[in-house]
Image (cartoon, rainbow, N blue to C red):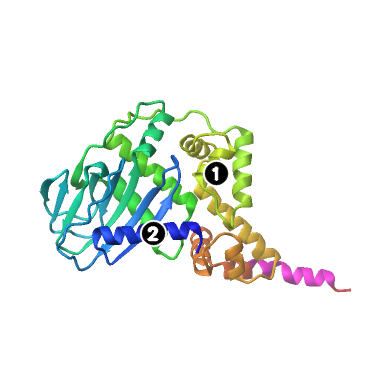
Amino acid sequence: MNEAGSQIDKYDALMQRRFRAQSTKSCFARGISKDPTVFTHITVPEPSGLWSIKPEPESAFSIHIVLAPLPRLEARMEGRRQILGALKPGEICIFDLSTFPRVLIRDSMQSLRVHISQRSLDDLADDFGQPPIGSLRPALGGADPVLSGLGDAVLNKTQMSDGEDALFLDHLALAFSLHTAQTYGQLRAINPLRGGLAPWQYRRATELMSARVAQGVTLAELAEACQLSVNYFARAFSRTAKMPAHKWLMNERIRQAKDLLLNMETPAVEIAAACGFTDQSHFTRVFSQLEGQSPARWRRLRLGDWRPAAQAAAMP
């Protein structure tokens, strides 16, 4: 097991103990600062009726997005107890982890927990030339369609056997932090970005993504190659390319896959691995969505067009 996998396993074990959960599934995104944003899908099918384990104090926040109806929930922060009403899917709770928050779960629960450090939010504010965010406004219930939609995107990416696309998750983490800082923090409105990447920056970013289709690449690596902050790079690339970097990378994976389908008698499973897809099923699904037909049919139609002519030209 690699170091990243071991780190995720340790974090999942911590979350399972803290919430007395049957299962958790976490993934890390590294974008804004050195501190990762952590997404954790928590499932508690048979609640123990006990308070969650008291967390170690830290300068960070946890945002819980409710995924299934939760009839009742109690919270305790800095020793103060608060009984919450019924929570519906899409509603959120924000906890300041410096206040030793605990919850009493009396019913089955499903939520997406997003862990964002204070430093990540402050680094984001600094990137926009604004003062530190400070504390976030507490939220114990209430709908937030933006965070709910971003949460759905995380779950769709990590639960459909697609694996974890680092670049895509980095974009989601950036969007989570930006919306949270503006809606629940003190980050003022952001002026639209007027310029894009310089030609050399765009070339360096796209060359790096093309060379790393199999391994993947992070926003931080792309930003560093262009000598920019992560946030500025993400916005500037989107303005220059008319699409976010993760979408450009996916298009590049499909382009390289087409070259292999046309020019090599390579099995689809090997093409999938060479182009950065988790497996053949993931490759087929994405290819079909973008091209309107499966890789096998696409290859069959194209090869069927040129093979007879080529064979005829080779005849004496």
Task: From the image, give the main secondary structure of the stretch colored magenta.
Answer: helix
Q: Amino acid at mark 2?
A: Lys
Q: Is residue 219 in view? A: yes
| Residue for badge 2 | 10
Residue at point 40%, 28% (across, down):
191
Q: Does residue 316 appear to the left or right of 80 in the view shown?
A: right
**Going by the image, does 219 lie left or right of 82?**
right
Q: Is residue 170 above or below residue 199?
A: below
User: Is residue 42 visible from the viewing direction of this image?
Assistant: no
- As drawn, the label of residue 26 is none
The residue lying at 14 percent from left, 45 percent from top is 79
| Residue 245 image position (x, y, % from top left) | 52, 45
Query: Are the residues flagged by discs 2 and 1 in contact, CB closer than 8 Å?
Result: no
The span shown in magenta is: 301-314
Query: Between residues 40 and 211, which one lies in front from this camera angle?
Result: 40
Q: Is residue 55 above or below residue 262?
A: above
Residue 133: image quadrant is: top left
| Helix, strand or loop at mark 1 | helix
Return the residue at label 1: 221
Residue 150 vs 302, above or below: the answer is above
Please state the horizontal and vertical placement of residue 114, each as a whole percent of the image.
Answer: 32, 50
